[in-house]
Amino acid sequence: MPTEPLVLGIETSCDETGVGIVRGRTLLANEIASSASEHERFGGVVPEIAARAHLEAFEPTIKRALKVAGVGLEDIDAIAVTAGPGLAGALMVGVGAAKALAASIGKPIYGVNHLVGHVSAGLLNVEGEAPATFEYPAIALLVSGGHTELLLVRNLVNDTELLGQTLDDAAGEAFDKVARLLDLPYPGGPHIDKAAASGRPDAFSFPRALTLPKDQAEHRFDFSFSGLKTAVWRTVQQLKERGQEVPVADIAASFRKAVIDVLLAKAIDACKHYQVPRLMLGGGVVANAQLRAEAARICAENGVELLIPSLNLATDNGAMIAALGAELIVAGLTASPLTFAVDPIMPVSSPLSNDGAVIS
Ligand code: KG4
Ligand code: ZN
């Protein structure tokens, strides 16, 4: 395998069919077909609709990515595909198609972890942006629609330790649920972000859960967002009962600030506690404008190096899967057997399906 392998990454864990191509840590293509608009009227992703949409989008998205990268299928060194976690039916479409593709071109396939992929996206060098310089260990904050986790990453490919996670709702889920309370469309994150831009973050005082001294012993690195969601619901109810207009921008800005304050305070606390002056961010919520700005500010203030995916690599995409595939290959891990299964609840501690062994 070359030192900078050409990897084609395929992502179908939810409603985005993503195909990315990387050479080592250099991004060559990132093509996405989304079925989000087909789910909008249901207020959430419908698994069967997502699976069928992946089937239809698979071939054209692969073709577009190859064209953008200026390479042919015969040039690809390996295929990486999301094995989990995610929606079983959606994962099965991607994994089945990826296996067929790998077999037809006679190249190895790596069934990789979507969550670790999110964090890997920050490692990619993107044209026009400063190259990512990086060393382990690092603290990783993973904030997606289904997960909120703090990790101590000694090495992304085989040594991550879960420090804490949400006890109830994930950060992205909280954005989606609060958007619904404010009559904003699904997925809520980008709409709350937009509404919050013209709002006052200090207009409402919403709770910051698990941040009190009494929480330090048991839940120092854990999160909880369901109380915050309830506080927003109660505020909206009271305003409506009094016949007052709901100030959507102010509520969105105050809610967004409450989430970001907790996420970053805990991430920086973990950096200090483990004496690791490096923070990796990953997951759809990293597309949040305020989170990106605040993370840069707080990390600079605390002497912490920040590794953050470029904006279009924050939400689900195939490039992050290709990026993780390349990391695994360069680290010398063996490919997954063609028989590997999808794992809808794949834990963040296993980056590769069927625990590829290191070739010594
Ligand atoms: O990582 P992701 O694309 O999919 C999952 O693996 O879950 O994350 C999707 C989540 C959704 O909850 C969405 O509302 C949230 O990321 N999100 C955002 C923003 N863009 C997407 N949350 C806050 N601000 C955003 N700009
Ligand atoms: Zn994701």
Image (spheres, grey):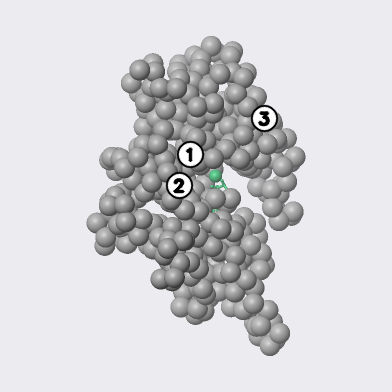
Secondary structure type for disc 2: strand
Kindly identify the amino acid type of the residue bearing the numbered disc 3.
Answer: Val
Quadrant placement of the C terminus: top left
Q: Residue furthest bottom?
A: 242
Q: Nearer the viewer, residue 319 or 227?
A: 227
Please identify the quarter of the rendering in which residue 248 is found.
bottom right
Give yes or no for contact between labels 2 and 1 (Cβ–Cβ under 8 Å).
Answer: yes
Residue at the spot 39% in from the left edge and 63% down from the top edge: 265
Horizontal relation, residue 45 to residue 11: left or right:
right
Question: Does the numbered disc 3 mark a residue whose Cβ is under 8 Å from ligand 2?
Answer: no
* Residue 150 visible in rendering: yes
Q: Nearer the viewer, residue 98 or 210?
A: 210
Give yes or no for contact between labels 3 and 2 (Cβ–Cβ under 8 Å).
Answer: no
Residue linked to disc 1: 349
Residue linked to disc 2: 162
Secondary structure type for disc 3: helix
Horizontal relation, residue 206 to residue 134: left or right:
right
Mark 1–mark 3 Cα distance, whole angstroms, equals 24 Å
The label nearer to you, 1 versus 3, is: 1
